[in-house]
Amino acid sequence: MLAGILLATCPCLFALDPTLDISQYAHTTWKIRDGFVKGEIPSIAQTPDGYLWLGTEFGLLRFDGVKTVPWQPPPNQHLATDVIRNLLATRDGTLWIGTTSQGLLHVHHGRVDALVQPEGLSSNSIGQGLFEDREGNIWVSTTEGLDRFRDFAVTTMGVNQGLLQAVVGSVLADRDGSVWLSTINGLNRWNNGQITVPNTGNAKKDGKLNGQDPHSLFQDSRGRIWISTLGGVGYLENDRFVPISGIPSGNVLGMAQDTAGNLWITDEFHGLFRVSSRIEVRQIPWGELGHKDHASVLAADPSRGGIWIGFFLGGIAYLEDGHIRE
């Protein structure tokens, strides 16, 4: 528990110095070959007590900064040994665990609640979407729909509630309190308890974007909803989808906006794209960033103004003023 004591007594450890380059940070690695843990770690979360929770293909581990231990639930409580797909530490200090085939688990107040399909969960296979909105609602995507937990009561949303298709690929919380949902059959929007098909400028209100299904979703600083499709990228404004020229058909994996108002888009096959506030597009092939692999995630850094880029085969880079710093 030495790491926990240090965290509790040294406020300086709670944040990295934003004036330093990434190469100046102290860096510690815990490797699989050194016996740290077996297999892949697809999810990490930290609860207010300082512990890191590691979701692995062999179950849940607790990490105190020195060693990992398999977490044991209270007596007569059950914890899945299934692959843990994602973790969410919520503001109230509880932990939500999404598994590949054993449903959703909620660790709180010294007990573990298991939520499975026979009890109302849309599917026992939890997807990649697991997040807490500003009102404290917990949103969970599964292979059969979308579930919302509010005051510990589950609300299941599927085709019968208005979803165009049960499989939800991306979830975006709008600043106005609504939630955008991209399904493999069109775009939906949840607002005030109702799921609707938003206007996209088509003659037929079918949730399509120029005949294409939505994939990634992002809201920019102006409130516009950016949507990627297999045909390209565009945004919704005044109930109309506006496609952007200069971004080819591809597989968009993420979007982020820097403090200058530039939108950054990572495409698996075509590289990194910058869309300026004047909708000017610049393409940066992955080779120009010194990588043969593509980036799989982007994250804005509002304190410094740049963008963090995470690469598929490992490594991160920081992009600022058009320059990459590894």
Image (tube, grey):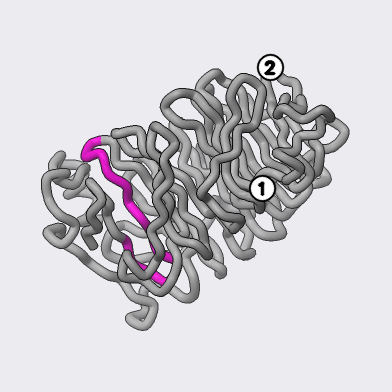
**Mark 1: secondary structure:** strand
For the point 27% across and 70% down, which residue is it?
29
Measuring from the top left, give residue 279's x and y in whole percent.
Answer: 44, 36
Q: Is residue 324 left or right of residue 115?
A: left
Q: Mark 2 highlights which residue?
A: 192
Q: Which residue is mark 1?
A: 169
x, y (%) of residue 6? 17, 49
Q: Which residues are magenta?
A: 303-316
> What amino acid is labelled 2 in the image?
Asn
Front position in the image: 31 or 292? 292
Question: Which residue sits at x=52%, y=37%?
Answer: 218
State whether residue 318 appears in this view: yes
Numbered label attached to residue 141: none
Dot 2: what SS?
A: loop
Q: Is residue 115 visible?
A: no
Rendered location of residue 217, percent (x, y)? 57, 40
Q: Looking at the image, is mark 2 or mark 1 nearer the viewer?
A: 1
Amino acid at the residue labelled 1: Gly
What's the residue at 67%, 59% (across, down)?
A: 100
